[in-house]
Image (cartoon, rainbow, N blue to C red):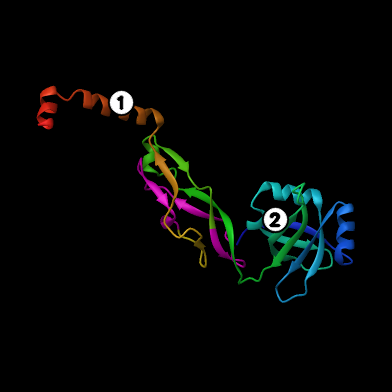
Amino acid sequence: MAGEIPDLEAFVRTGTGKGAARQARRDGMVPGIVFGGDVDPLPINLDFNKLLTKLRAGRFKATLFNMKVEGHDDVRVICRDVQRHVVKDLPTHVDFMRLKRTTKINLFIQVEVSGEEECVGLKKGGVLTLVRPEVELMVTAGDIPDHITVDISGLEIGDSATIANVVLPAGSKPIIDRDFVIAQVSAPSGLASQDDEDEDVAADEVPATEMANDDA
């Protein structure tokens, strides 16, 4: 299970219609609605500045939130729509969907690396590159992992670890329907440059007679 699902504080919005929404905006709030889960829709207000900070942080629609509303039980929600001002591009209304434990959703899950101390390639001076610090997975709302782990202990210089090498949590699968690289061990830049120079020198040292024979 995910250790820290971010909280999102909201307030019950009294009144409905455009008038109540305009008043909320004048009060520094953004009106919204929480729907789904076989429960009546709940009109809410969110603090404008806090919401804007989360929106600017990115991936707002791909983040699972623990919504806290006074007088109501906490509920897991995911954003389904953000309406914005046509000129200022600022949020004017937000729609959230309640999630059941069995609901399937797409989320970005952090990647952690194991086996660095045992990695053969790193011991030889190789450099580890984490190509994908996060991987988008389809997961079950009731069983969201903190992270997935990629083991690089067996990688040599030039080897890569792909999503096929990762043991995914039960009920999870990648959004991308193909194998893709998560981490790789590359040669140090100095060593790579030296290898290129050696290849160039080797080519220059081929005797002219051999080259002539090859042309023949």
Query: Compared with residue 143, is residue 189 higher up or lower down, i.e. above or below?
Result: above
Residue hosting label 1: 197
**Sooner in the amino-acid sequence: mark 2 or mark 1:** 2
Report which residue position mark 2 lands on. 6
Instruction: Mark 2 and mark 1 in contact? Answer it, CB < 8 Å.
Output: no
Residue 59 in the image: state x and y as whole percent: 64, 52
Q: Quadrant of the C terminus?
A: top left
Question: Image point 41% across, 57% down: which residue?
Answer: 164
Q: Is residue 115 visible?
A: no
Q: Which mark is nearer the camera, 2 or 1?
A: 1
The stretch in magenta equals 137-166
Q: Is residue 58 above or below residue 45?
A: above
Under circle 2, the secondary element is loop
User: Is residue 30 rendered magenta in the image?
Assistant: no
Q: Which mark is residue 144?
A: none
The amino acid at mark 2 is: Pro
- The crowd level at tag 1 (other Cα within 10 Å; few <14, some 14-19, many 20+) is few
Q: Residue at x 72, y 77 (%)?
A: 38
